[in-house]
Image (spheres, rainbow, N blue to C red):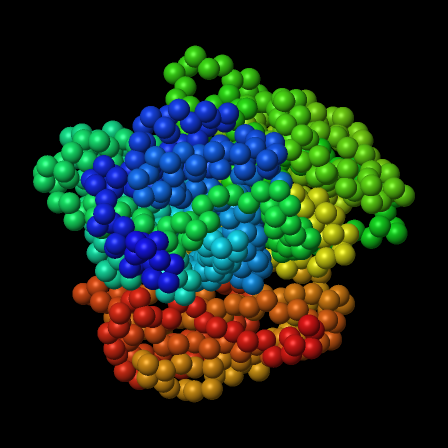
Amino acid sequence: MKRYLNKELSAKERATDLLNRMTVAEKMAQVNCYFMTKNDNFDGLKKDFPFGVGQISALEMRNNYNIEDDVKMQISAQKIVLKNSRFHIPAIFHMEGLSGAYISGATSFSSGIGRGSSWNPILEHNIGEIVGRQERALGITNTLAPVLDVTRDSRMGRQGESYGEDPTLVSAMGTAMVKGLQECSFGRTTQAVAKHFAASQSTLGGIHGAENEQSQRVVQEVYAKPFQAAISLGNIRGIMPCYASVDGLPTSVSRPMLTSLLRNSMGFDGLTISDYVAISNAHSVQKIGNTYTEAGLKAMTAGLDMELHFKQCFNDELGKWFKENKADIEILNRAVFRVLKAKFEMGLFEKPYSLSGDELKENFSVPNDKKVALDSSEESMILLKNDGVLPIDSSKTKKILVVGPHAESARYYFNGYTHFSMLEGNLAAIATMAGLETKNDGSIKVNTIPGSKVERDNEKFETVFKKLNPSVPNLLEQLQKDFPEIEIKYEHGYDIAGNDYSGFDSAIDKARGADVVIMTLGGKYGTGSVATTGEGIDSTNINLPECQDRFIEAISKLNIPLVGVHFDGRPISSDAADSKLNAILEAWSPAEMGSQALENILFGRTNPSGKLPVSVARNAGQIPVHYNHLNGSSYHQGESVGFSDYVDISHRPRYYFGHGLSYTEFKYQNLVIDKSEITSDECVNISVDVSNVGQLDGTEVVQLYVTDKYASMTRPVTELAGFTRVFLRVGQSKTVKFILKASQLAFLDEDMNWCVETGDIIVSINKNADEVVLNDKFKISNTKLIQGKDRALYADSIVLGDENDA
């Protein structure tokens, strides 16, 4: 038996043996990708990849309406790949997975920023397991998730993909999803591909893919931290670099980023995969290399292993360079070894095909999947404001008016990285996804919403949605079905963008006599010209559209209780909403279970528990306004040489990171730190008692923050160190214990070495990043240099008493 076929050997041993048998042409095939299309006859796969291919994009499964067509696509393509390859090397199939697979019938989940609002890594692990299982069932073993971007800019259309602005929160949530994704079933293992390494969402002007001016210190301490957690704690097997230039080099061709930092310093030993057309973009737009081939060699030399989504820079000419020794063959060997090793780790040689028939039906979806989706939708929602109007008492409510486009179509609940949104984007006049963008030279005429560039709604979008999701109700349908005794009326009122006020009078007239008005607010987080935010849809205006602000001002004169429910990929920011609405519920993009989750919270069946994963800017001119800024900066700059506010608005955010209200009240007491002094190798145990002193059962997110009082470098004013969710019945108390290692407090010193430094550390338990409830301190007694990859990344936690609620 050939050694590479021996399942008893390690993936490394099998890959080494197979690599030594391959020609240059066969090796080049392994670093390339084929992009399947709808109704593909695979002539291009047969002709252009005569030696097989490394990867196949399963993205266009989004166009199928039944899973049987997906099975047919995968099996047909894989059979051709195996036939073309002399060694029958199977292809890796990849698919997006941020909010569920682009597969008909796959479970869809809330957006990344919504799930970050849950502060629930356990739930995130369960979501990862579902996404990985459903994709593995279709033969897809590279899931392009999680997004580990740290986001500090609401102008960027992709903010909704991230878990939030804090690297500790993103680290914990992302690592949990990695672990869930990379579980094994059907004899195959998914390899998660985290993106977008690193500092993707800190580009100039909030423009996707633009230049990045962050220092290496900030890149490593902040933006690379979630990737370090995924590597150190999640054993992640795949990384995708971002489009942006960092330190003057597009990341996809940057040896300092992909080898010096990612592999040598951070210890990553998996597969690096380019974002769609990222290498060719480095040449044609960012002007790297004289030719596509030169850019390709620079990328592979830098440490990039595979080019997606079609062959352009890892091309035949580059293969010729390797064959003729114009380029070092070991560069190619290194990349191909990693590809082959990944395929053996995935189990593809033994299980290359999709499941089918009864086996597929039994494993693709299981009954608990919908429950996980509902839990995720509910926990993603944040009660930002409430004067007592929520929860709505159905026994005392006779008439409700529901206003706004989001209430009459559940399409708005599906974010830009859900299956439906991808399918909807194909129907839009203009596509905006990177690598698939429509370049409009003016010949494409778009029927837009007045006062905006957003494509006007069209029946075709709703028709496709109903075909794909016939059982998903909108909010209006959900309310009318479950509360037939209440008169629930609807008015469109206004749109998701622009300045059309023509629907105001009708809506205001119908509101007269209502006990409460529920207004759905915000834009559409999606893809293409139908969306107001999403990939390739950046904005200089982060506030509610003019028509919605004006409507709030107008209807508030009726003095009827007003509840705002906000849908979008960025948080709500509105002076009118803050001053005029009685309650504001941030709903993000709650996906298929969104209407049920909203109803449960609005009527008090579920107590809201979400917390903001970002600080909310008052307007775009205030960005950045993240809470963990350096001492003497942002809204703490007034303590220094400056003034406490702008001339026109406050320095402070509209809402603080970690903010979120409940229908009950929680009390903290008895903060205890078990040691007053530790060495740089030790840890402290921090405990606090939490009690529910309100009138309803509820869940509190306990937030632990640390501050380095004085240091050799300017440090953040405070930083999230750990967190945990605690469910408490009325009158119940529990003790939360955090284990904080000194190495978690390490930072890069003046010489760019990771250092645990002597000094006082202030520990606090907060309601949000600005509201300290309890605090104390301990001291680190000695200074020590450490390896950054070995440092602790977030504090572990234990809730004493949880076992009684099991």
Quadrant of the rendered image containing residue 519: top right
Q: Pick the quarter of the image with the N terminus.
A: bottom left
Return the residue found at the far front.
1
Left or right? Give the position of 754 relative to 350: left
Nearest the camera: 409 or 403? Answer: 409
Percent of width and height locating residue 378: 66, 53
Front position in the image: 229 or 25: 25
Q: Which residue is drawn at 45% across and 45% down?
A: 352
Which residue is at the front of the view, 224 or 22?
Answer: 22
Q: Which of 205 and 235 is in front in this view?
A: 235
Q: Can residue 755 be seen in this view?
A: yes
Residue 548 in percent (x, y) is at 62, 34
Rendered location of residue 767, percent (x, y): 56, 66
Left or right: 223, with 729 as reference point: left
Which quadrant holds residue 631?
A: bottom left
Residue at 35% x, 58% y: name it: 6
In the image, what residue occupies the spot 49% across and 37% down?
Answer: 75
Quadrant for the C terminus in the image? bottom right
Residue located at (72% from left, 38% from top) = 471
